[in-house]
Amino acid sequence: MTREELCAKKDEAVAAFSFTGTYLDAMPYGSGHINDTFLARFAQEDGSVRPYILQRMNHEVFRHPEELIENIRRVTGFLRERLEAAGKNADRECMNLVPCKDGGWFYRDSIGSYWRAYLFIDHAVSLDAVTDPSQFYQSAVAFGRFQQQLDGFDASTLHEVIPHFHDTPDRYRLFEEAVAADKLGRAAEVADEIAFVRAREAFPHTLMDAHASGKLPLRVTHNDTKLNNVMLDETDQTPVCVIDLDTVMPGFSVNDFGDSIRFGANTAAEDEQDCSKVHLDLNLFALYTKGFLEGCGGKLTDTERALLPVGAKMMTLECGMRFLTDYLEGDTYFRTKYPTHNLVRCRTQFALVREMEAHWEEMCRIVESAH
Ligand code: ADP
Ligand code: GN1
Ligand code: MG
């Protein structure tokens, strides 16, 4: 869909939801790679302006948007009850879908795109990079707490919206398929990256094997714990709310930990073109470990704790493989801004994997000594 078509459809979608006030405008918002997010503004009778989040769900990535919405309804309903019971402000500390005028929770537009809307979480920020280490610590508390809050939620009742999402051996298989197909003739250009992945062929099995042998439990996890998927209070940076609940599914706690490290403990941006700037910040790693364990409130088993560094390397290698696979397949999954964007992202991930390998003992020591 072109930008113009998308903008035309967003106005159609705006009209479908029960927003309060008079529609002013809706502008593209945020820096997610998957959905099309808009900030829709409405004038209120008292002269103030009320924002809402309006999103076109990515139908290519999420094949069954109705199931996705059902998951989100159930998870947010569960969280709301817990927050209300604890006397918290559930409109701010939890995602809240805005209903459609017909009473449904999503809108299907005239060309078949699916839309949803959320209450806007105000006086809070979503960060693309850490500017103060305490922000990273707070995001860790938020994601750890999120997992703890969902303890008791029956994971088997959730739809698996993206099957095998963090099944890293399966990601490896898809990577090899993309290399073999070499649809765009790009494989030769990325021979070094292909060799990098193949040299680590055994590693992707580590967590799945630990699970198969009964050592690593499945939990309800977030599965996309990027720093920008948590809102922090704009004044004191304390956690407000975990967002982007699309991938809440059964998963491994260590992968939730790991995906945050992948994104937030990298000294460079995910799409930094100069890989020499990519380092693992061990202070941030230690801070996140402390915050995550605190947030989980003692729920992790000894094996889960011991496997936290593996989760960090797993998510970084997997994400690099996913960017590389998408590059080989012609950039159909992640939103890209220029032709080699996915390749650049893949290279930063692999540089970070190298850093983790170089600092492996330190990572393990930090986890061992964390309380
Ligand atoms: P994607 O799946 O594309 O990453 P997200 O659901 O993470 O989409 O939304 C993209 C961005 O929009 C977030 O990083 C955040 O900045 C902003 N955002 C999403 N939901 C809300 C909300 N309820 N309140 C405030 N900002 C939000
Ligand atoms: C996507 O949706 P967003 O931008 O928060 C992706 C994650 C990747 C991430 C890489 C549903 O996250 O799995 O780790 O990009 N989400 C999905 O930046 O595939
Ligand atoms: Mg996001």
Image (tube, helix red, strand yellow):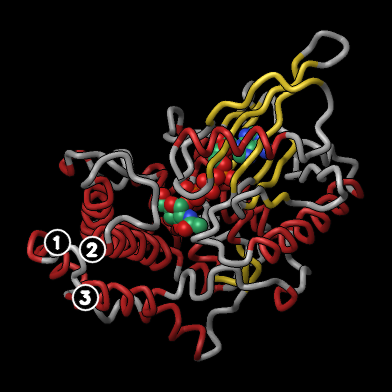
Label 1 secondary element: loop
Q: CA distance from mark 2 to mark 3?
A: 9 Å
User: Is residue 349 positioned above or below 218 on the image?
Assistant: above
User: Is residue 144 positioned above or below 166 on the image?
Assistant: above
Can the viewer see residue 5?
yes
Q: Which residue is mark 1?
A: 186
**Are the two marked residues, 2 and 3, in contact with CB atoms closer than 8 angstroms?**
yes
**Left or right: 344, with 92 as reference point:** left
Residue 328 badge: 2
Which quarter of the figure has residue 279? top left
Q: Which residue is mark 3?
A: 181
Q: CA distance from mark 1 to mark 2?
A: 6 Å
Query: Between disc 2 and disc 3, whose residue precedes?
Result: 3
Dot 2 alpha-carbon crowd within 10 angstroms: few under 14, some 14 to 19, many 20 or more = many
Label 3 secondary element: helix
Q: Residue 219: x percent and y percent?
A: 64, 71
Count of numbered tags: 3
Q: Residue 190: x percent and y percent?
A: 12, 61
- Amino acid found under the numbered disc labelled 1: Arg
